[in-house]
Amino acid sequence: MKKIIILSAAAMLAGSVYAGGYRISMQGQRQLAMGHTGVAVINGNAESIFFNPANGVFLENRFSFSAGASALFANTKFQNSTYNWTNSSENLGTPAYFYANYKISDRFAVGLAVYTPYGSAVDWDTDWQGSHLVNNIDLKAFFIQPTVSYMVNDYVSIGAGLIYVNGGVEFNRNLSRSMTDDQGNRSDVTLDAKGVTAWGYNVGLTARLDDYVTFGVNYRSHIDMEVENGEATFSDLPDFLKPTYEGTTFSASMPLPAELTFGFSYQINEQWLAAVEMNHTYWNKYESLDIEFSNGTSSVNPRRYKNSNTYRAGVQYTPSEKLSLRVGGYYDETPVRSGYFAPETPRNNSLAGTLGFTYNITPKLGVDVSALFIHFDEFEGHYDHYIEDGLPVSFGGTYRSAVGSVGLGLSYNF
């Protein structure tokens, strides 16, 4: 019985931590509207420094500021026709960002980026058919990134930034498919890790190959989120087990994968700009999650995620100094291997469409608007590595997911 509880809690956290789920690509309304391209796009405001720190020195204005937020609507439906199981999860996320860039000289600039690339939730019905894997999860993380950029010559710049992360995760699930307290209530556990901090870095290069074509490349490092003394709260346990698990804490290392992005933009003429890029995410770093509990037990939980790519494209049309219109899209590959598809972070390959516009109220102040819709392929997915009574138990069915968002931002340059 003790082993069941420990393995259940450990496997729960392993499935929840950032692994592919709704990793939010909404770090700027202008860039999001162009299919979230940006590594080689210098789009007139401070958003550019998130996508590539080398872009900062190419901004025209001495001071550039950008801030915004989005409302993210996520919906997932689950069905298992064999057992006539159905359930759904509907959730709202609010990713936000703030960027500032200061050109100290024509060849040197400094900047600051604050953003939330993780901030979504999954909330299934309590005690649903997959409750032994997850009832709900809430991820939050704030990234703070100071940057510098230097223009090597009239055509090439380099940039770098430190990344400071502060975040946490709260996750609840039932301890098994059948365990209850003496009154018949399902036993569950909540793992809560707050104030988890870590450091990383990113480096980039921007090259204007000629008057029309710009090339950009950006690398964001792998980051390990180390949890120490996270809180594990067990509820509705059988009376004979309560003394063993009161005051239990846990420690774990949660990986955020490295990313490499490169791409091109093409200034077709004064009105039209096009961009394409590819993002490669090194999910293979996430082989397993090792968890140590304060009562002396531990667990190793395999995940075996694979590296994945995202392909992005977008265009911008500027008919006047007041207005810019944008449209784009991207295709995002799942990092989840067959047999590891779990309802903690339900996702498969997805296709996104984006659009938006900027309206310049004054030459200095602009309003940025974006909209996004993500369609996930309908998928028959199973998780085959949940252990109960020493044996693997498979859980799965058909998942249908969709995500939509609307976003608003302000840009100020002078």
Image (cartoon, rainbow, N blue to C red):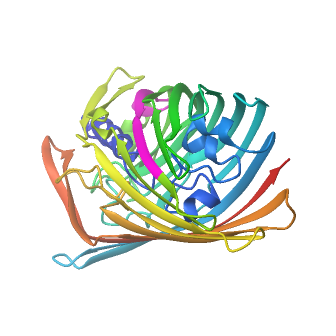
Is any part of residue 190 visible from this angle?
yes
Q: Residue 273 appears in which quarter of the rendering?
A: bottom right
User: What residue is at 34 percent from the left and 60 percent from the top?
Assistant: 347
User: What residue is at 20 percent from the left and 50 percent from the top?
Assistant: 337
Q: Quick check: 30 left or right of 66?
A: left
Q: x%, y% of residue 3?
A: 25, 34
Most distant residue in the top direction = 296
Q: Nearer the viewer, residue 408 or 108?
A: 108
351 drawn magenta = no
Q: x%, y% of residue 170?
A: 52, 45
Highlighted range, magenta = 244-264
Q: Quick check: 340 left or right of 297?
A: left
Most distant residue in the left direction = 391
Is any part of residue 236 visible from this angle?
no
Q: Nearer the viewer, residue 307 or 40?
A: 40
> From the viewer's perspective, is residue 219 above or below residue 292?
below
Q: Nearer the viewer, residue 228 or 313?
A: 313
Q: Residue 395 appears in which quarter of the rendering?
A: bottom left
> From the viewer's perspective, is residue 390 above or below residue 37?
above
Most distant residue in the front direction = 211
Q: x%, y% of residue 393?
A: 16, 52
